[in-house]
Amino acid sequence: MDRLRIDKWLWAARFYKTRSLATDEIDKGRVSINGQDVKPAREVKVGDTVAMRREGSTRTVVVKGVSDVRGPAPVAQQMYEETAESLQERQRAADQRRYAREPALAIEHGRPTKRGRRELDEAQRQGWGDRWSASVDDQGPPKK
């Protein structure tokens, strides 16, 4: 066997958990072979370059083997070789995620609960509105 459908190959190489997930990604235009967008029935052969966009980055691999059987992960990894540019891009993206986190991820609690809202309202009624700073001192607003 020297040729295989791209959706079967992606499934056998363990890029996607099911063939239907691979087919969906191909239909969305996230997979290309040798720089061309493909359909799920497009055949892939040894030496082709397959590019997949996942999670904000593009992973580019060169096909080294073709199999329509989904085997263990070490066997599946022998079916392809990732390009040096793709490895560098994935490392750069990982570093960027580590050092510059998404600001929205810093919000741990989200909206206050009903109980938390009542506590905030009570604290405002107790005198938050007339305080000029968040410090503990009770000096009041600055004198003019």
Image (cartoon, rainbow, N blue to C red):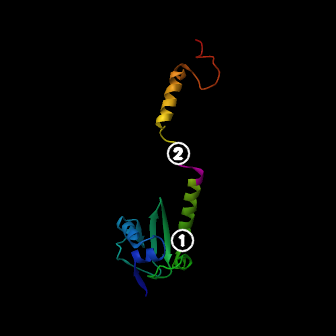
Secondary structure found at label 1:
loop
Residue at x 52%, y 42% (from the top left corner): 109
From the image, tell me which residue sits under label 1. 83
Q: Quadrant of residue 138?
A: top right
From the image, tell me which residue sits under label 2. 103
Q: In terms of depth relative to the viewer, which is nearer, 130 or 116?
A: 116
The region drawn magenta spans 98-108
Q: Compute the Cα span from label 1 to label 2.
A: 32 Å
In the displayed structure, 122 sits above or below 44; it is: above
Asked whether residue 121 is drawn in magenta, I would say no
Image coords of residue 77 (percent x, y):
54, 76
Secondary structure found at label 2:
helix
Image coords of residue 17 (percent x, y):
45, 70
Q: Quadrant of the C terminus?
A: top right
Residue at x 57%, y 49% (from the top left corner): 100
Disc 2 marks a residue whose amino acid type is Pro
Residue 13 shows in the view: yes
Image coords of residue 14 (percent x, y):
49, 73
In the displayed structure, 5 sits above or below 139; it is: below
Q: Residue furthest right?
A: 137
Image coords of residue 41 (percent x, y):
34, 77
* Label ID, residue 64: none
Q: Residue furthest bottom?
A: 1
Mark 1 closeness class: few <14, some 14–19, many ≥20 residues within 10 Å = few
Asked whether residue 103 is drawn in magenta, I would say yes
